Amino acid sequence: MKITHAFLITALTAVTTPYAFADSSSTPYVGAEIGVVQLTNSFSNIFSLITGMDERVFAGTLWGEGALKYGVEGSVMYFNDASLEDPFGFGDRVDFRGYAFSALGVVKYNFDSGFSLSAKAGPAYLHQQASSNGMSVSHGQICPEVALGLGYRFNPQWEAQLTADTILANESGSNPVYQTKSLNVGLTYHFA
């Protein structure tokens, strides 16, 4: 329940923040995506194929004249339904869930055909929880995040996108978090 409240509060903040940066030369936008997430680490024979579902809400502002735009974006990603059956041969199941808050710089190029390419990078706070047999362990850390996207704009307001995203976590030390990769599809609304 706590994660759901934090997710909703952060989603509302992410959606309203771009208006603080908006001016007459900017284009604020909001959007949502769903997709698959994969957790990976160096124990590739055990954990490399932990997959689950993720949801992401985001908001940002783009500036720039012509085809090349630049801007900022805030987002919240939540993932669950990631599980591993009997990873150590003891008959146990390990369930994974987590969330990430991101603040990304954005560079976007719009083609005349309606297609666009985007690149995003910046810091993310990634929090993951593993649960098994009534016990759970959770860790969080600030990590770099990078994303590449392909979009298609139906009209000046609506755009569909496919986004590949990676949060490069550090699994070593006293606060291990696994690298998180996601592939999402979604819609963006531009306040043009």
Image: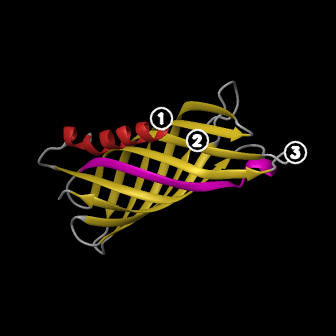
Taking the spot 21% from the left edge, 66% from the top edge, the residue there is 156
The quadrant the C terminus occupies is: bottom left
Residue situated furthest right in the rendering: 89
Element under label 2? loop
Query: Disc 2 vs disc 1: which is toward the camera?
Result: 1
Circle number at residue 90: 3
* Mark closer to the chain start, 1 or 3: 1
Query: Disc 2 vs disc 3: which is toward the camera?
Result: 3
| Callout 1 amino acid | Lys
| Callout 2 amino acid | Leu
Give the magenta-colored segment's residue range: 44-62
User: In 3D space, how far apart are the residues under numbered discs 2 and 1 (Cα atoms)?
Assistant: 25 Å
Circle number at residue 168: 2
The residue that label 1 is drawn on is: 2
Q: Callout 3: few (<14), some (14-19), or many (20+) C-alpha neighbours within 10 Å?
A: few
Task: Please give left or right for residue 18 compared with residue 34 in the image.
Answer: left
> Compared to 146, does 68 lie above or below?
below
Element under label 1? helix
User: In 3D space, how far apart are the residues under numbered discs 1 and 3 (Cα atoms)?
Assistant: 31 Å
